[in-house]
Amino acid sequence: MNLTFPFRNWAYNSLLKFYKVGFMARFSKAEMNIKEWADEDFDVQFYQDRIPSFENELIQIIDTTTQETIDYYFKTLAEDLNYAKQLLKEDYLLEQIHEYNKEKLEKFNELVETKTEEYFKSSNRQKAHLEQYEETIHPFFGTSSMFSSGAKTVQKTNYNFYCIEDKLEYIDPKIIDDYLPFLKEQFELLKDVSNKYGFLWQDGKIKSKAGDVINLKTILFCEGDIDVTLIQKAAEVLNKNQVLENIELRYRGSCNNLDKLWSILTDNNWETVPQKKILLYDCDTNRPDEDFGHIYRRTIPKIETNIIQRGIENLFPKETIEKALEHKKEFVDFKIISGTERGISYEKTETIVNKNEKRNFCNWLLENGGIEDFKHFQVIFDIIKQTE
């Protein structure tokens, strides 16, 4: 069997690139915080952008191919993951760094020797380092004067030496303290998606649908996992669970990651089976509503009169936020921002849920939220309805 799975291969091979010493050398040279560096590195972003495509490919394999292909897919995927996991060790990375440093040191020493030899071949560098020689000194006119009266000969030592400007390429083994957790995090991205379906396959719960009528669920992509949780709660209190029965909720981590997914799905749309996907943005992102075949981009309308100005939490009415603040004032940050724009002074208040309290605020809503608290979430179910 000779099957090719392009997005899985892209994701897996991109992951393996992070295991190579050349990639560690790039991080070492950058002299940056590992998170800042990863956020800017093209290869890291390329890999992370392939993960959603890998999951879409995996779902398509499950929904449209034979059992033989499905079994082959998961067996080879498990082999790939086991191999990557075996290499995910500090000793393996340190061994590569040691060999890299050893090779670079040997090449550096060869370079120094070659350049030093070339340097001392010049006519004014004939004397060797520490070589003794005589020099005539005139008391009035200095060294090697044409006037010989009163001159004397002195013994001198040549301290001639060569300073090379090239620097040794060296990876400090201490980078492992930052690099190994980064590498584990990238491995987990691939593993989590694989396990999500792999365990079901292992338990015999994934069977070929080839020949059946294909009825794929719509996928609703949100920015964060808290968005997914709150939408599920809203469906419960607003009696919309039936709507979510035909919807698969996923999250991408940020609006920028939703943008990347939109780009992938619209610019490199490889899917042969139409599956509706809705990319749902928070109200503050200002992304335009767009349609591309069965792909939809939608932004939640902002409610200007509500207290929270950013995120899905903008949907909660003033009364809900006030009750939440009575419970815990740390839930919400109130910031006064001032400045000038085109010479005109301004001052405004920014009100957002504290990033470290988002989960706690969500949990409070899960326990205490009712119909009145979640009533504005109706707009999300309207968006789903409008794309049918």
Image (cartoon, grey):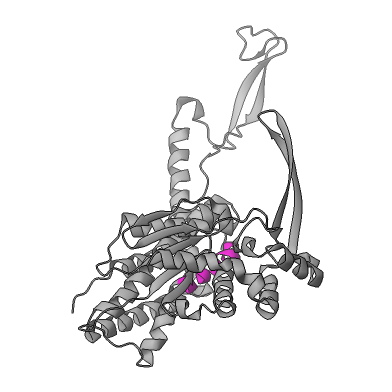
Note whether 61 is above or below 274 in the view shown. below
Q: Which residue is situated farthest in the bottom direction here?
A: 203
Where in the figure is residue 277, as x and y percent of width and height? 39, 66
Residue found 75% across the figure and 51% down from its top: 335
Using residue 350 as the reference point, say whether residue 45 is left or right of it: left
Where in the figure is residue 251, as x and y percent of width and height? 50, 68
The N terminus is located in which quarter? Answer: bottom left
**Is-magenta flag for residue 185?**
yes
Residue 20 in sight in this render? no
**Magenta region:** 175-189
Q: 150 or 256, which lies in front? A: 256
Q: 332 or 110, which lies in front? A: 332
Q: How many marks?
A: 0
Where in the figure is residue 120, as x and y percent of width and height? 47, 34
**Is-magenta flag for residue 309?**
no
Residue 117 in sight in this render? yes
Q: 365 or 235, which lies in front? A: 235
Q: 366 or 125, which lies in front? A: 366
Note whether 204 is above or below 152 in the view shown. below
Which SS type dominates the magenta stretch?
A: helix
Residue found 74% across the figure and 62% down from its top: 332
Residue found 60% across the figure and 60% down from its top: 311
